[in-house]
Image (spheres, grey):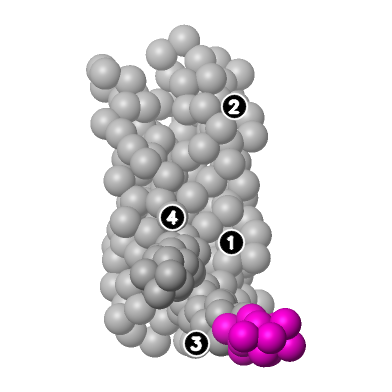
C-alpha cells in the first residue's frame, strides 16, 4: 500500500471516529437539556430537617422560591433548632435548566449560636421528567456554623413541592407551608447523566477500534 493510500485510509477512519464523537456529544447536550433525577441519597448525619415550607415557581420570572422553618438538626442525636428558618431561591428556566441559586438556614442549636447554621450555592438540579416529587439540589457549602460538619458539598431533597407533569412550563405551588426538606451530605456525588452517557459511548468507540486491530 502506497503512502497516499495509507493517508487516505487514515483520514477516512478519522472522519468516522469524529462523527461518532460528535453524535455522542449531541446526545450529551440533549440529556443535559432534559434533566432527570440525580439519584441523590443523603448520609443519616449531619441532617437539617425543615418543614412548613411554601414552594412557588413563577414561569414568567423563571424563579423558584421556598421559605419555611428549620426544625431539627441530627448529628447522631436529635437537636431542636430555635428560631430556625429555611430559605431557597433558584433560577430555573422553562426547560428545567438550573442557572444559579442559593439557600440559607438560620437558627441556633446544640451550641451553635451565631444564628446562621448553613449557607450555600445551588449547583445542580434533579427532577422526574414525568413530574412529581422530589426536587433534588446539589449545593456548594459556603458558610454557617455547621459548615465544618458538612464539608464542601451538600445536598437538598424537597418533597410535597407541588411540582407536576407540566414541569417548568407553568406556574406551580406547594400550597401554604406544605413542603419539607432534608439538607445533608451526599453518600456519593451523582454523575451528570449526559456526561456518563458520553463517557460510556466514547469507551465503546475506543474498544471497537481496538478489536479491529
- Reading the image, the residue beneath label 1 is 90
- Reading the image, the residue beneath label 3 is 169
- 3D distance between C-alphas at marks 1 and 2: 19 Å
Look at the picture and state if 156 lies above or below 105.
below
Kindly state the secondary structure of the residue where label 4 is placed. Answer: loop
Q: For residue 72, say whether it is visible.
A: no
Q: Nearer the viewer, residue 156 or 65?
A: 156
Kindly state the secondary structure of the residue where label 2 is placed. Answer: loop
Pick whichever of labels 3 and 4 is earlier in the sequence.
3
| Front tag of 3 and 4 | 4
Look at the picture and state if 2 lies above or below 204.
below
Residue placed furthest toward the front: 1
Query: How crowded is the residue under tag 4: few (<14 C-alpha within 10 Å), some, or many (20+)?
Result: few
Query: How crowded is the residue under tag 3: few (<14 C-alpha within 10 Å), some, or many (20+)?
Result: some
**Residue 18 placement: quadrant:** bottom right
Q: Report if the CB atoms under discs 4 and 1 are less than 8 Å apart.
A: no
Residue pictured at 37% horizontal, 70% vertical: 211
In this picture, which residue range is highlighted in magenta?
1-13
Amino acid at each position: 500500500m502506497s503512502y497516499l493510500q495509507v493517508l487516505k485510509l487514515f483520514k477516512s477512519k478519522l472522519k468516522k471516529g469524529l462523527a461518532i464523537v460528535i453524535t455522542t456529544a449531541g446526545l450529551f447536550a440533549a440529556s443535559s437539556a432534559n434533566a432527570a433525577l440525580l439519584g441523590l441519597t443523603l448520609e443519616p448525619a449531619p441532617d437539617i430537617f425543615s418543614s412548613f415550607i411554601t414552594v412557588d415557581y413563577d414561569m414568567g420570572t423563571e424563579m423558584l422560591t421556598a421559605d419555611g422553618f428549620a426544625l431539627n438538626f441530627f448529628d447522631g442525636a436529635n437537636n431542636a433548632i430555635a428560631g430556625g428558618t429555611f430559605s431557597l431561591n433558584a433560577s430555573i428556566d422553562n426547560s428545567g435548566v438550573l442557572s444559579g441559586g442559593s439557600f440559607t438556614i438560620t437558627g441556633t442549636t446544640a451550641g451553635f449560636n451565631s444564628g446562621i447554621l448553613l449557607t450555600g450555592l445551588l449547583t445542580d438540579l434533579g427532577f422526574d421528567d414525568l413530574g412529581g416529587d422530589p426536587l433534588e439540589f446539589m449545593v456548594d457549602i459556603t458558610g454557617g456554623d455547621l459548615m465544618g460538619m458538612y464539608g464542601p458539598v451538600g445536598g437538598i431533597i424537597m418533597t410535597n413541592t407541588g411540582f407536576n407533569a407540566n414541569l417548568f412550563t407553568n406556574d406551580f405551588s406547594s400550597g401554604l407551608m406544605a413542603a419539607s426538606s432534608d439538607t445533608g451530605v451526599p453518600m456519593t456525588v451523582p454523575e451528570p447523566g449526559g456526561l456518563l452517557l458520553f463517557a460510556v459511548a466514547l469507551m465503546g468507540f475506543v474498544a471497537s477500534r481496538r478489536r479491529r486491530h
